[in-house]
Image (spheres, rainbow, N blue to C red):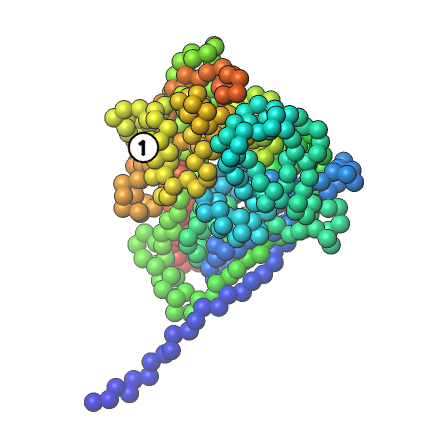
Amino acid sequence: MMNYEIREVPMQSEIRTEEVETMNPATPTTRVFKFKIHNTGFLDSTSMIKFNLLKTATADAAHRLRVNCFNGILGAIRTATMSCGDFIICETHDCNQIATLRHLNKSQDQRNDFFGHYLGNSLQVEVASDRGADDATNGADRDKGQLRVTNNSGANFGTQNNAGNARLFSKSIVADKANSDVYAIPLYMLFPAIEGRQMPLFLFQDYPIILEVEFNEASKYINNIKRHPTYEALDTDVQISDCKLVVDYVLPPASVISKYVASTQKDGGYRFEYPKFSLVKKSLPATGGNRVEQEVEHRLGQENKEIHKVFQLKQYNAAKTTAMADKVLLSQRVDGSDTEEYNVEINGQDVYRDDIFNVASQYNELTECLGEPLKIPRAMYFNDCNSQLSHLATLGSGLNVQYKPLGCDLTNGTGAINGGGTIVQQGSPLIWKYKRTPSVAIANVCVDNTPAMTVNYHVMHSGLAVIKKLDVGTSVQVRQ
């Protein structure tokens, strides 16, 4: 028997790309940009924010500027906010830190050759095979095994005596917009709500979707290699120009849209589940001297939230030095004490039976949080005193031990956004227990580990937007 029923051939989704201008007027000093996107189709995670960087009058003709080699223009983003009407879907503070850790953790080829095309990052290092010629050229810790920046990074940071002989091998930021490079950042790096998923904009028909991006000061992410000895640009050396949003709208067949709309009419409505980050800022005071133990409990709150991961990122409050790490990483570095340990308390119970004190164990815990190993030269992470005293990882002019985030994974292994983490009960705040026993500066071994530190905790937890169809229009509720 033949079936003569006429079947509809499924249609393919279409992609429409548009450039969106800023809502707010932009001036040479503007660092906050707002965009309103249409409630059409799906918002694809490959959409980008693009802009130019232009040299200003405070940088003279001899000054050569470029975004830092480590994370490039990603270091420029301080805060990224996605809002829907009066609700904030996600708001990521110190976005440059957590976005770099999570999204630039790629192999060197992919990080530099692919992302470098958009972000301008290009850090490449080599291990010194011989002891340096002298302190003026290679720094006090010029021993064999030190990490050095190669010329393939696009910049030569000169000798350690800061004679001003640094130079660029890549194109400098210029004043002429027609000859300037265009930088672009994929939106999934900034907004976790669309990371690995598409957002059904058509369901938010009565609520405008607003994306807001705030930029850091230029000194935090741009090198001016003529401003030795720090090679740090002034905040006024660069201005942001022609900032736009390049939006990819995915337009599915009508049958797909009908299924999503039908789900808003069911009990409970349509649930848009996504991860989001909260930032908790803490501090550590300076210790009293060499090997003086300091122990703190940082209460992070988060009651009634479902927590997935916690990242601790620290920076010394000491003034910038002439060390190579300060020149190359600028304010993008993540410091760690030479002797430190931690545990995490949730709902009155410690996550770990014993404190995590071994550097290899700390590295492995961070691997669990990221879902893959931290893909930087291993010596950039390890800073334990045994490695330093054996000159396997000396700390100073090179790049050894300059990027050491800590992490704690609180997921339950299911992989779910809602239901895959650990709920913090009311009255039992999330507590990060931290202890350090830092050393003072030791010539040719380590710098002073005792100064005060700024501590940022990036807490990843579940987010939920519930969309319900009403007799007239729709209702959107964003729940933490």
In the rendered structure, which amino acid carries the disc numbered 1?
A: Val
Q: Nearer the viewer, residue 40 or 179?
A: 179
Question: What residue is at 42 percent from the left and 11 percent from the top?
Answer: 292
Quick one: 473 or 285, which is closer to the camera?
A: 285
Please tell me whether residue 156 is drawn above or below residue 1 in the rendered image.
Answer: above
> At 34% across and 46% down in the image, what residue appears?
417
Q: Residues within 10 Å of mark 1 (few under 14, many from 20)?
A: some
The answer, for residue 255, to whether it is visible in the render is yes
Q: Residue at x 52, y 34 (%)?
A: 128
Residue 126 rendering spot, x and y as whole percentages: 52, 39
| Quadrant of residue 261 within the rendered picture | bottom left
| Residue 428 visible in image | no
What percent of the width, then of the height, locates residue 461?
Answer: 38, 39
Pointer 1 residue: 424
Q: Residue furthest bottom?
A: 1
Q: Residue at x 53, y 39 (%)?
A: 125
User: Nearest the camera: 71 or 477?
Assistant: 71
The quarter of the rendered structure image containing the C terminus is top left
Q: Position of residue 270 (x, y in %)?
A: 36, 54
* Left or right: where 70 falls relative to 167: left
Q: Residue furthest left?
A: 1
**Side of 444 relative to 342 (left or right):** right
- Which quadrant holds residue 137? top right
Residue 473 at x, y percent in the picture:
45, 57
Say which element carries label 1. loop
Position of the N terminus by quadrant? bottom left
